[in-house]
Image (spheres, coloured by chain):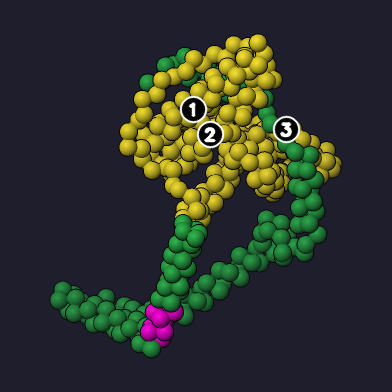
């Protein structure tokens, strides 16, 4: 235990306030569901409380929180996916692809859409991706994991990670281009 | 292939996204859950929350029980081995004699283990139970799949 303020509860509240947006963002981007993301964020902070003596002044606390949030969110997805697949209520979408589609990348630079509106547009496009494309994208671009690390976390092959990233990026760029074109039209 | 500029542009866009604000209720929920946990007696909290003496007491008790259990389980085997290793036992023998004595011990251990196996009736009962579980689970899944795929 390090020398800190005499009120650990107040310290923990301050710790939570400092990091809750980061933890929640990680969870909500992986899960694309605000209710489930809040559940995951709650579990992360409950775990953090058990290790608060180590985490409170640690410079690596944010890394620990993000890693736990990522793992819990992925576990959450896996648990539900396994249940749905077994009961035949969902289709597995993580089989090896038979071939890569011929994708033509859209012009990625939206013109008139800027600032907050563009962020909302990108965020919505990301949230609209299917899980098997969204999760690798989030892990690669937000959590900055390598292909291999993503493959290990998701228990899929590296080739599958690359394919899903490829398709995910293509779908994301296409949606952004379409949405921004619509916004351009509306603005014009 | 996707060109590098598209990927870089996308990476920049994604990295520039602001953090999603956590809902107001998150902090309340965490603090309420912590208060609930702390209101519980220590033995219902997680092991980390136990008093130091209780943690050590539990470890010692658990190891003691494990020792007793292993001792009970392996008593017949260890007695046979101890008998073999006594002066005049296996240790004092050489060559083919030692191999023969070893085989005799293995046979004795095998008999002890066989005697510890459940009787045929209990095995039949266990097999029937597990088969019923598998059968019910499989038929339930089949019915569910049939109904969900063909709701008519």
Quarter location, residue B47: bottom right
Locate the N terminus of chain A by quadrant.
Answer: top right
In the picture of the structure, the residue carrying the numbered disc 3 is B21
Q: Which disc is residue A171 wearing?
A: 1
Cβ atoms at labels 1 and 2 below 8 Å apart: yes
**Chain designation of label 2:** A
Residue appearing at x 48%, y 41% in the figure: A153
Residue B128: in magenta span: yes
User: Can residue A44 be seen in the rendering of this structure?
Assistant: no
Tell me the chief SS of the magenta region.
helix
Q: What's the magenta region? A: B122-129
Q: Is residue A9 above or below residue B82?
A: above
Measured Cα–Cα span from mark 3 to mark 1: 26 Å
Q: Looking at this view, is B76 or A17 the one in front?
A: A17
Q: Nearer the viewer, mark 2 or mark 3?
A: 2
Q: Nearer the viewer, residue B56 or B5?
A: B5
Query: Chain A in the picture: what colour?
Result: yellow
Q: Position of residue A82 (x, y in %)?
A: 49, 53
Q: Residue at x 51, y 16 (%)?
A: A108
Q: Is residue A73 above or below residue B113?
A: above
Q: Is residue A86 left or right of residue A1?
A: left
């Amino acid at each position: 235990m390090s020398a800190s303020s005499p009120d650990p509860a107040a310290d923990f509240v301050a710790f939570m306030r400092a990091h809750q947006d980061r933890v929640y963002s990680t969870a909500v981007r992986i899960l694309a569901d605000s209710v489930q993301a809040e559940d995951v964020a709650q579990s992360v902070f409950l775990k953090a409380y058990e290790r608060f003596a180590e985490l409170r002044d640690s410079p690596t606390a944010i890394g620990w929180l993000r890693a736990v949030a990522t793992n819990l969110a992925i576990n959450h997805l896996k648990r539900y996916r396994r249940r749905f697949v077994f009961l035949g209520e969902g289709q597995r979408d993580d089989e090896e692809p038979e071939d890569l589609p011929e994708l033509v990348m859209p012009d990625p630079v939206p013109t008139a859409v800027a600032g907050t509106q563009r962020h909302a547009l990108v965020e919505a496009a990301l949230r609209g991706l299917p899980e098997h494309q969204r999760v690798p994208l989030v892990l690669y671009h937000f959590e900055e994991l390598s292909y291999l690390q993503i493959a290990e976390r998701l228990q899929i092959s590296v080739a599958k990670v690359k394919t899903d990233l490829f398709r995910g990026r293509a779908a994301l760029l296409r949606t952004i281009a379409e949405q921004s074109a619509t916004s351009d039209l509306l603005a014009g | 292939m996707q060109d590098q500029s598209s990927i870089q542009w996308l990476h920049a866009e994604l990295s520039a996204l602001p953090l999603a604000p956590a809902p107001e209720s998150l902090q309340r929920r965490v603090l309420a859950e912590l208060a609930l946990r702390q209101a519980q007696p220590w033995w219902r909290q997680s092991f980390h929350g136990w008093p130091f003496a209780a943690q050590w007491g539990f470890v010692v008790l658990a190891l003691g029980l494990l020792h007793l259990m292993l001792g009970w389980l392996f008593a017949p085997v260890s007695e046979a081995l101890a008998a073999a290793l006594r002066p005049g036992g296996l240790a004092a023998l050489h060559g083919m004699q030692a191999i023969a004595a070893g085989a005799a011990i293995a046979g004795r251990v095998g008999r002890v283990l066989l005697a510890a196996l459940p009787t045929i009736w209990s095995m039949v009962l266990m097999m029937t139970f597990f088969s019923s579980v598998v059968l019910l689970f499989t038929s339930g899944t089949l019915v569910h799949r049939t109904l969900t795929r063909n709701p008519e």
